[in-house]
Image (cartoon, grey):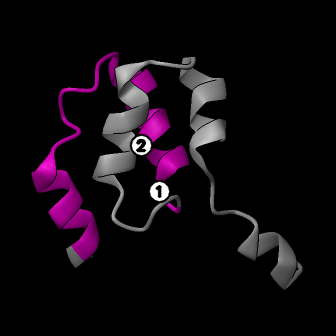
Amino acid sequence: MRLSLILEAKLNTQWLEKRFGVGNPSVSKIELCDPTGGWYYEWLTLLVKSIGNDEFLNEELNNNIAFW
């Protein structure tokens, strides 16, 4: 895999809005929950969609991701 492809893997707000829709509260919760600013957006999106809610997106999860 080329390094440029790896560097482009960091996602942004527009990507989240395509998945959830503009104005969806899950978008802002995922942004606040990811301390890296985009590296974990896809993983968090998969969790929200598989669980069916975004209640687990909180400061504790943010701290755990930052620690890990």
Residue extending farthest left: 60
Q: Is residue 38 left or right of residue 62?
A: right
SS state under label 2: helix
15 on left or right of 6: left
7 in relation to 57, above or below? below
Per the rendering, the mark at residue 40 is: 1
Could you tell me how many numbered marks the image carries?
Answer: 2
Q: Which residue is drawn at 10% across and 54% down?
A: 60
Q: Which residue is drawn at 21% across and 77% down?
A: 67
Q: Report the front residue among 46 and 36.
A: 36
Task: From the image, give the main secondary structure of the stretch colored magenta.
Answer: helix
Camera-side residue of 23 and 18:
23
* Nearer to me, 37 or 63: 37
Residue 61 among magenta residues: yes
Q: Are marks 1 and 2 in contact (CB under 8 Å)?
A: yes
* Segment colored magenta: 39-66
Q: In which quarter of the image is the C terminus?
A: bottom left
Horizontal and vertical percent for residue 11?
Answer: 63, 54
Category of crowding for the residue at label 1, using alpha-carbon neighbours closer than 10 angstroms: few (below 14), some (14–19), many (at least 20): some
Q: What residue type is labelled 2?
A: Leu
Q: Distance between the residues labelled 1 and 2?
A: 6 Å
User: Mark 1 belongs to which amino acid?
Assistant: Tyr
Position of residue 40 measured from the top left corner of the image (x, y, whole percent): 47, 56
Label 2 sits on residue = 44
User: Seen in the image, is 58 located left or right of residue 52?
Assistant: left
Magenta highlight on residue 68: no
Q: In which quarter of the image is residue 1?
A: bottom right
Which residue: 18% across, 27% down?
55
